[in-house]
Image: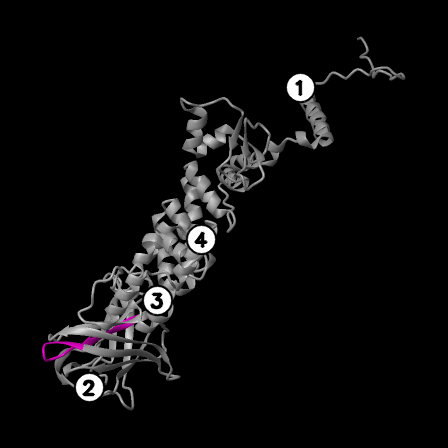
């Protein structure tokens, strides 16, 4: 038998032959050799073996040059340009737009694509979602991410962005998000923005986002019947918007220019809903209206029949689909007289509501006009929260006739308030069989499905009105 050769001796400078091994030992030796190479160069680590699932392996490739076959150069004028690696297979699997881009009849083999309308962070939000289903959006990235998701038709990410915006909608950002909702044609988000603006109009028109809206959106705002704000406050906010717009256009914010930038929006302000004092002291002296318009408005306040004016004269918050009525009487009788004393009734609700006015009975002697001072009083402090001097015309029927405050008033749940009306006019109808508790159904409206009113007697001078009988038949409100 021939002896097998022993191990070679290594002389200085002499190459030592690698021993012959079986298949298994060859594989183990190769693995050890590769591990030594990986340890020497971490970039060559066998990353696949460290990922337990396909999802983890695909996610590892996010923003990674390993096997990347396309580069995006991303950045707008306002952002630093960034080169982002990607993988066509992953992009095409998650976006029909990318699929058309890389596999459609007009596809290109260009290995680097320039995107000038997208911010790098928004594009990374999109890619992260395509690679891992992970959504990372925040106040600073959600709008840009929504734009990117829409551009590449990634509907699930678009849905996440819209839900985030809905959940973070506040008075302070309502106009900003409204702008974006209209731009992206997100009707549900737009309606939610309008609902917040309707309920908190005085606060919303003071926020920075209001001054960034377009004239078109300003006109849409002024056309709304559901704004809960006095017309004077609305005019003042619109005037400030116009002054800011003048500055944007680099023109002097004088009255003539304010009127010019407002354009059609000026004719949508409901000046007839202001009191004579408010109009005389704030609008007439602003210089925004022409002399002819000011004169026509003064005539509107002082003569009957009232002349036509170029401004809407219907009160806001009168959309019948949203206005609710708490009627406290069962039948109507005659007669009820007036001698300068206020009719009063105390009430509380189990939910927060917004009171806009009252429904009152009119004359038993045919057509007549009443002068009315209407007020809402805090029962605990006896302080007047709001009041309005107004008039209403009745037709001699036992129906109720509505009078409104200048602005909508919040009524807190479980707090007591006094509805007060001082009328000057002929004897009227009045209500009987009054109810102590009235529950109003509110189906199809945002908020509670039912609102309950509890009515109480007011001691002292109340012109005879009580829970059972009297005036102030209806409380008009929104939820």
The answer for how far apart the CA atoms under marks 1 and 4 are is 84 Å
Write down the quadrant of residue 71 in the picture. top right
Quarter of the picture containing the C terminus is bottom left
Report the residue at 52% width, 34% height from top: 54
The secondary structure type at the circle numbered 3 is loop
Q: Is residue 357 above or below residue 132?
A: below
Quarter of the picture containing the N terminus is top right
Discs 4/3, front: 3
Q: Position of residue 45 (x, y in %)?
A: 66, 31
Q: Is residue 206 above or below residue 95?
A: below
Report the residue at 51% width, 42% height from top: 122
Residue annotated with mark 3: 284
Q: Position of residue 143 (x, y in %)?
A: 46, 46
In the displayed structure image, the side of residue 75 where residue 235 appears, left or right: left
Of residues 230 and 238, which is closer to you in this image? 238
Residue annotated with mark 4: 246
Residue annotated with mark 1: 23
Discs 2/3, front: 3
* Residue 87 appears in view: yes
Which badge, 3 or 1, is on the more N-terminal residue? 1
Residue annotated with mark 2: 338
| Magenta span | 354-369
The answer for how far apart the CA atoms under marks 4 and 3 are is 21 Å
């Amino acid at each position: 038998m021939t002896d097998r050769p022993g191990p070679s001796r290594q002389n200085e400078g002499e190459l030592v032959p690698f021993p012959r091994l079986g298949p298994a030992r060859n594989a183990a030796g190769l693995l050890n050799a590769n591990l030594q190479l990986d340890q020497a160069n971490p970039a060559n680590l066998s990353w696949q073996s460290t990922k337990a699932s396909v999802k983890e392996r695909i996610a590892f490739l996010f923003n990674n040059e390993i096997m990347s076959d396309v580069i995006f150069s991303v950045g707008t004028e306002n952002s630093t340009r960034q080169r982002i690696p990607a993988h066509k297979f992953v992009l095409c699997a998650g976006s029909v737009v990318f699929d058309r881009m890389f596999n459609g009849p007009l596809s290109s083999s260009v290995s680097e694509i320039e995107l000038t309308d997208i911010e790098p962070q928004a594009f990374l939000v999109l890619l992260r979602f395509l690679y891992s289903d992970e959504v990372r959006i925040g106040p600073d990235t959600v709008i840009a991410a929504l734009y990117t998701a829409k551009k590449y038709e990634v509907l699930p990410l678009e849905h996440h962005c819209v839900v985030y915006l809905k959940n973070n909608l506040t008075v302070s950002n309502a106009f900003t998000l409204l702008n974006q909702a209209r731009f992206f044609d997100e009707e549900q988000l737009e309606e939610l923005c309008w609902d917040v603006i309707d309920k908190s109009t005085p606060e919303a028109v003071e926020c920075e986002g209001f001054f960034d809206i377009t004239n078109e959106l300003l006109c849409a705002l002024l056309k709304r019947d559901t704004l809960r704000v006095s017309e004077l406050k609305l005019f003042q906010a619109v005037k400030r918007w116009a002054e800011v717009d003048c500055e944007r256009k680099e023109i002097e914010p004088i009255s003539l220019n304010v009127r010019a930038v407002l354009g059609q929006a000026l004719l949508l302000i409901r000046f007839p809903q202001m009191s004579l004092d408010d109009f005389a002291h704030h609008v007439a002296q602003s210089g925004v209206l022409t002399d002819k318009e000011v004169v026509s408005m003064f005539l509107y306040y002082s003569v009957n029949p009232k002349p036509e004016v170029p401004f809407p004269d219907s009160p806001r918050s009168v959309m019948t689909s949203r206005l609710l009525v708490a009627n406290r009487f069962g039948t109507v009788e005659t007669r009820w007289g007036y001698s300068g004393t206020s009719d009063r009734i105390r009430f509380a609700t189990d939910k927060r509501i917004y009171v806009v006015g009252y429904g009152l009975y009119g004359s038993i002697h045919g057509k007549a006009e009443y002068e009315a001072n209407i007020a809402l009083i805090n029962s605990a402090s006896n302080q007047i929260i709001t009041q309005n001097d107004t008039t209403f015309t009745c037709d001699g029927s036992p129906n109720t006739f509505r009078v409104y405050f200048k602005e909508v008033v919040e009524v807190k749940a479980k707090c007591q308030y006094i509805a007060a009306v001082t009328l000057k006019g002929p004897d009227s109808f009045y209500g009987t069989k009054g109810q102590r508790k009235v529950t109003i159904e509110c189906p199809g409206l945002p908020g509670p499905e039912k609102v309950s009113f509890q009515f109480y007697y007011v001691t002292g001078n109340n012109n005879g009105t009580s829970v059972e009988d009297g005036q102030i038949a209806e409380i008009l409100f929104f939820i």
